[in-house]
Amino acid sequence: MPFIKKPRTLKPLGAVSIGTGERAVKIGGGNTLPLYFFDAKLSNPPAVGVELTDTAWDAAELPLLAKAYEGAATLAERVACAANMKGVDFVCLRLEGADPGGDNLSVEECVKLAQEAAAACTKPLCIAGCRSEEKDVELFKALAAALQGQNVLFLSAKEEDYKTIGAATVLAYGHKVAGESSVDINLAKQLNVLMTQLGIPKESIVMNLGGAAVGYGFEYVSSTMDRVKAAALEQDDAMLQMPVITQVATETWAVKESMASQADMPEWGDLEQRGIQMETVTAAACLASGSDAVILRHPVAVDKIAALVAALI
């Protein structure tokens, strides 16, 4: 009789729930290696989020993306469109307008926008800041209070500000928070240790391990995710068993293949199609490496990745 190796039964990893009621989504909770859904019954499929900002996209450069939000004049209307896109599990609102080097919207203005967006959103909400550490701390403190009871995921807390952001978002108002590190397993674990020592439950922490577009040092991202998943599953490392979320959109739409105009690089083909391909390939690679949730921007990429997940499960 031939020897048949049975799949290993591993301890399920931590899961984090965002949103409320029937529209809540759980991220993580698997007990297999990435995409090894044939090894064990799937707890929660990888989640697909769509990112939009409080500023409108350039319709001239990205007509397909602009078409997805056609007729949506306000941020609340664009958020409603994003939530209704095919394949979307949650919506990520990036408050770019708060950037002190840009529009420099006040905290009060951003809170008003976020409240309007949350009221229009039919999916769980994730909020990212403007990449200004000082402004983001102010923003998250005010937003956590204004959105109390909506179980929002805030991206992200870093080693420099985890105390303030963690206390304001999770401990004070019961939201969830992502711990952001720079593509290093030791830094990721250290931040998780610090946040749990602060009193933040593991069930409220998601890991943002950092990212890169394929071809731009992605091998470091992939190897870090591989090591994190291996430690979490095979070594039962409790401080690395939180779900992993990856902000694919911010990386892939910032590289030259997604930005160089057709006038400058005609041999590269259509600008928007290049961006879609870069985003789709990077997201698929992230899921294969161990990400439990990916945040994308283009509706075509969202649809493709959601279809990939559905086909695998």
Image (cartoon, rainbow, N blue to C red):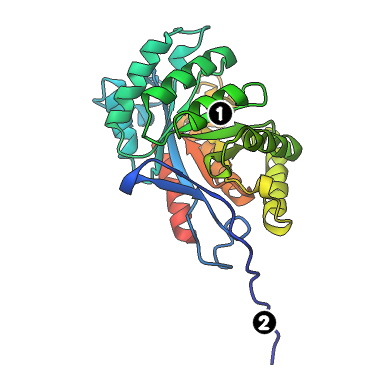
Position of residue 24 measured from the top left corner of the image (x, y, whole percent): 38, 45
Horizontally, is 198 left or right of 87 in the view?
right
Q: Mark 2 = which residue? A: 4
Horizontally, is 201 left or right of 188 in the view?
left
Position of residue 47 measured from the top left corner of the image (x, y, whole percent): 47, 47
The circle drawn on residue 166 is 1
Q: Image quarter for residue 124?
A: top left
Residue 194 seen in the current view: yes
Crowding around mark 1 (Cα neighbors within 10 Å: few <14, some 14 to 19, many 20+) is many
Q: Is residue 25 above or below residue 214?
A: below
| Disc 2/disc 1 C-alpha distance (Å) | 48 Å
Q: Is residue 244 above or below residue 56?
A: below
Nearer mark to the viewer, of 2 and 1: 1
Horizontally, is 12 left or right of 311 in the view?
right
What is the secondary structure assignment of the residue under circle 1? helix
Crowding around mark 2 (Cα neighbors within 10 Å: few <14, some 14 to 19, many 20+) is few
Query: Mark 2 touching mark 1, by CB under 8 A?
Result: no
Which residue is depicted at the point 61% across and 55% down? 34
Position of residue 33 measured from the top left corner of the image (x, y, whole percent): 63, 58
Q: In this view, does 28 lie above or below 302?
A: below
Position of residue 49 measured from the top left corner of the image (x, y, whole percent): 44, 39
| Image quarter hosting the N terminus | bottom right
Q: Image quarter for residue 20?
A: top left
Which residue is depicted at the point 67% across and 46% down? 240
Sequence-wise first label, 2 or 1: 2
